[in-house]
Image (cartoon, grey):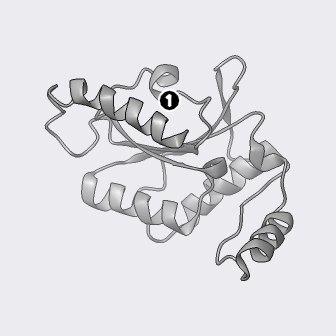
Amino acid sequence: MTMQSIERLLAHNVGLSSEAAPTAAPPTLRLAIVTCMDARIDLFGALGLALGEAHILRNAGGAITDDVIRSLAISQRKLGTREVMVIQHTKCGMQSITDEEFRDELERDAGLPPPFTAEAFVDLEANLRESMRRLRESPFLSHRDAIRGFVYDVDTHELREVPRG
């Protein structure tokens, strides 16, 4: 089944590949967005973004991991971004698991413990505030004054800002 999906996407790409791409590599809005990989989140539609306007970093839960900080450091220091939006969402699957359960499952199936945590959480707003705190305290980010957090409602597609706290 996966190959059929990939083939469909490749067929679409044949028509797209002749269109002109944006000429500038740095995002024109000087913005980076960290969000969840959840397929219900359409950032381009929800925010009115166009191709080339923002860096978009996605992972399970929109977690602020070392790799996200690495990517944001490159985004800021080498590609000129100045603002960061962290967007987490309602009905996130990361609220239905625990780090311990997931670690045990991986260790049982793989035969060794994972070198990472799942970054599961219960309280969405508390997790979002912790995510913003991690970014603001990172010595690797050069622009920490314009970091804002939002909850995306997967039912209504509305964004609600969560204050620092």
Q: Position of residue 107 (x, y in %)?
A: 77, 76
Q: Is residue 111 left or right of residue 123?
A: left
Rendered residue at 81%/47% (across/down):
95
Rendered residue at 84%/60% (across/down):
98
Q: Is residue 60 left or right of residue 81?
A: right
Residue nearest the observer in this picture, 7 or 95:
7
Residue 141 in sight from this viewpoint: no
Q: Position of residue 146 (x, y in %)?
A: 48, 46
Is residue 138 shown above or below 47?
Answer: below
Which residue of the protein is positioned furthest toward the bottom in this rendering? 112
At label 1, counting other C-alpha atoms closer than 10 Å, the crowd grade (few under 14, some 14-19, many 20 or more) is some
Circle 1: element type: helix
Q: Count the numbered circles shown.
A: 1
Rendered residue at 48%/56% (across/down):
144
Q: Where is residue 116 in the image (x, y as percent from the top left)?
A: 65, 72
- Where residue 114 sits, quadrant-wise, is bottom right
- Where residue 83 sits, quadrant-wise, is top left
Residue nearest the observer in this picture, 92 or 88:
92
In the image, what residue type sits under mark 1? Leu
- Where residue 102 sits, quadrant-wise, is bottom right
Rendered residue at 28%/35% (across/down):
52
Q: In this view, does 20 lie to the left or right of 38?
A: left
Q: Name the residue under label 1.
A: 43
Q: In which quarter of the image is the N terminus?
A: top right
Q: Where is residue 89 in the image (x, y as percent from the top left)?
A: 69, 36
Residue 48 in sight from this viewpoint: yes
Is residue 82 shown above or below 152?
Answer: below
Is residue 7 shown above or below 64?
Answer: above
Is residue 22 shown above or below 37?
Answer: above
